[in-house]
Amino acid sequence: MTQELTSPSPAPQAPGTGRGPGWWRDAVIYQVYVRSFADSDGDGIGDLRGARERLPYLRDLGVDAVWLTPFYASPQADGGYDVADYRAVDPLFGTLQDADDLIRAAHDLGLRVIVDIVPNHTSDRHPWFQDPVLARQRYLFRPGKGESGELPPNDWESVFGGPAWTRTDHGDWYLHLFAPEQPDLNWDNPEVHAEFEAIMRFWLDLGVDGFRVDVAHGMIKAPGLPDIGHGAQAQLIGAQVLPFFDQDGVHAIHRAWRRLLDGYGDARGKQVIGVAEAWAPTGAATLLMLALPGSAYLYQGEELGLPEVTDLPDEARQDPAFFRGGRATGAAGPGTDTESAPDGVAAGGQDGFRDGCRVPLPWSGELPPYGFGPGGSWLPQPAGWGGLTVAAQTGDPASTLELYRAALELRRRLPGLGDGPMSWAPAPDGVLAFTRPGLLCTVNTLGHDVGLPAPGTPLLSSAPVTVDDATAQLPGDSCTWWAI
Ligand code: NOJ
């Protein structure tokens, strides 16, 4: 890296929701999928400069922080989650100077920046994996089973489908819980720990405010790499502890990173490890999520109510899960993770394949690329998105975008909403009600209206609520915030 960068820009300091030390406890964090957010140079691929130019939109939306998906040097076998150099920016997305400029611009606008760190695996193009000696120390290589080692070392399956092992020209096998281009690191090796701490320091020195840890439940594997004995492992994820996820040793890694960030000494105060898997709420669910304690994660485009695109042509697709899962040839494949679902959990839409939620954002205009950039877009945008653009929704009180803006503004205005207490309130069957500092939230989970004594004055609702003679009618599948 030849670029000279100056000292890090100071993070926002103002007190209040989403500010100051511990800001992450109640922050609203917006996930920017860099490739699909905004394109500055017309190559049809979103980039850091494009993201920087759109930061005022995020400030006005009312989020506290931006989470940037991986923009590091990568062959892009898995949308950048296959990192070849953790300290370099991939030319597709810009330069290190662009990252520095973005962090500074975000801080100037009062936004924090967290970056994705990918510690479970690297790219197979990473220099460590390219060196046969180093690779066998820092990744998980094993001899195969069978008379001549022709069978994988155990029965583990890749989250993307197929065996989790690939045989090398040397005859041994390496583990990859995701694509073959993403070999799993050997976290029993202290050099791996040291390298990731150094990578974190590199980005903290550049001014980032924290990290989103990819596959945060991974890294440590059970001793001996035991067989699971179940042919459909994706279905077991979350239901039982598997020998490759949620192992006890994972906590020690997170504690070490927590200490690194706590002790990270400069004027900017404490930083945070944001260990997160986001989920993208729809309809009523957004107001419910924003009324719950803790930080909230928004996935880009949900504030526009963008639907999953389910009719992408096969030749446009890039999600390795689509190809590994056998869908490209019409065969059934296992469910896998999406931008909005935890690793390995089958999601809706196209059985969890992720290109459909990565279609570039529509900003303005009636025709593709809808202001995404001066060129086209790497995935085709649907013809009917003119009414869903940021420009079309801005100022329309009935729009999803204005609902989000109003909800985020209220969340900021009500002290303690993010990080304060919560208690359940009485409600009819099929309705949830709970109080938070400054409001009561009702969620009608039924498909039809429900009447109940009005708990207060409606502040915000995902669907029109009526109050007559102190009786409120909650529309089916709706969430309402009440001033109490
Ligand atoms: C979770 C990320 O959301 C996903 O895009 C990626 O494929 C896997 N982790 C593996 O890195």
Image (tube, rainbow, N blue to C red):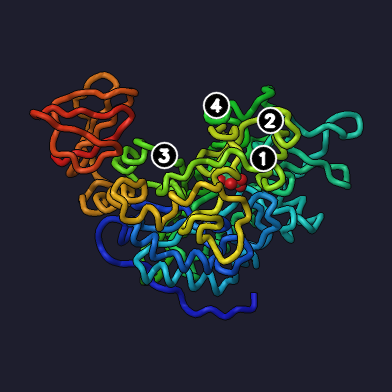
Foreground of the two, 4 or 317: 317
Task: Give the number of the mark in front: 4 or 3.
Answer: 3
Comes first in the chain, label 1 or label 2: 1
Q: Quadrant of residue 325?
A: top right
Q: How many marks?
A: 4
Front position in the image: 221 or 43: 43
The answer to whether 303 is drawn above or below residue 472 in the figure is: below
Indicate left or right for 265 with 89 as reference.
left
Disc with the residue nearer the chain's start (4 vs 3): 4
Instruction: Give the spatial CA distance, label 2 vs label 4.
Output: 21 Å
Q: Where in the figure is residue 178, as x and y percent of width and height?
A: 67, 42
Comes first in the chain, label 3 or label 2: 3
The image quadrant that residue 440 belongs to is: top left
Which tag, 2 or 4, sits closer to the chain's start? 4
Query: What residue did someone put label 3 on?
Result: 281
Q: Secondary structure at mark 3?
A: loop
- Report if residue 268 is visible in the image: no
- Name the residue tied to disc 2: 333
Task: Quickly name the residue at label 4.
Answer: 240
**Disc 1 versus disc 4: distance between alpha carbons?**
23 Å
Query: Does residue 69 appear left or right of residue 106 in this picture?
Result: right
Kind of residue at disc 4: Gln
